[in-house]
Image: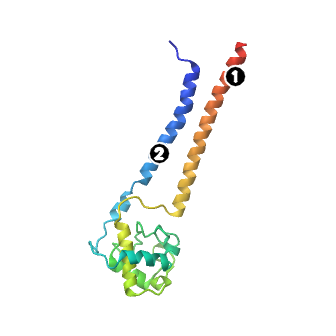
Amino acid sequence: MRKPRWLSATTLAFLVPGLLVGLASVALAADASPSPSASTSASPGGGGGNLPGDPNKGQTLYQSSGCTTCHGATLGGGVGPPLHPIKNLGDTKDPLDPQYLISTITDGKSGVGGYGQMPVKGGASLSDQDIKDLAAFIIQQNRLKGPVPLAPGALAQSTIEWVTIGVLAMLALTFLLSRYNMRWIARKSGGH
């Protein structure tokens, strides 16, 4: 017994978008998993298990001292380099070494790694303990396992990609349904 023609067209009309959504879901799940580079930077040397300061105070200081202006609210970077996962600017072997972070925050940087100038103490009036707390916060964030929040540019790019996939899936479904509809109309008009 032969299957009706409409059954294959309908199946195809639902199968193609279903496959597109399935593949998109797999790709999204792969993007959400932590990258190998984030895992390797998550085991910093130099500090071992000890932090130079209080990461909770460091988080508060990070938000209130203007660090977010250059390094982003989620440490993802912006005008300044990303701090989670931390980017090695090429002027140290281990960017999560507490002494490196403390000296960078204390003395600032100028033109390292293709970035502009980081002012001394981030342009804020920070005490030595404040700087140690900030370094502890950065180290702690890089030790956390799990997905890293997307930087604003990467988030925008991801949004554009997923909207494009959705639009293409809708176009494919519309095309397949219109072909089915035209065949149905032709069959009905030819039969009467």
Name the residue rendered at 42%, 74% in the picture. Answer: 59
Q: In this view of the protein, can residue 7 be seen by the observer?
A: yes
The tag on residue 185 is: 1
Residue 139 location (% of width, % of height): 35, 72
Q: In this view of the protein, can residue 95 be seen by the observer?
A: no
Type of amino acid under label 2: Ser
Q: CA distance from mark 1 to mark 2?
A: 36 Å
Report the front residue among 25 and 161. 25
Residue 17, quarter of picture? top right
Report the front residue among 176 and 146. 146
**CB atoms of marks 1 and 2 within 8 Å:** no
Which residue position holds label 2?
25
Name the residue rendered at 40%, 77% in the picture. Answer: 58
Type of amino acid under label 1: Ile
Residue 110 location (% of width, % of height): 48, 81
- Depicted 179 relative to depicted 50: above or below: above
Determine whether, in the image, residue 37 is placed left or right of residue 19: left
Residue 62 location (% of width, % of height): 45, 76
- Depicted 164 relative to depicted 46: above or below: above
- Depicted 76 relative to depicted 20: above or below: below
Q: Considering the image in quadrants, where does the C terminus appear?
A: top right
Residue 134 location (% of width, % of height): 40, 78
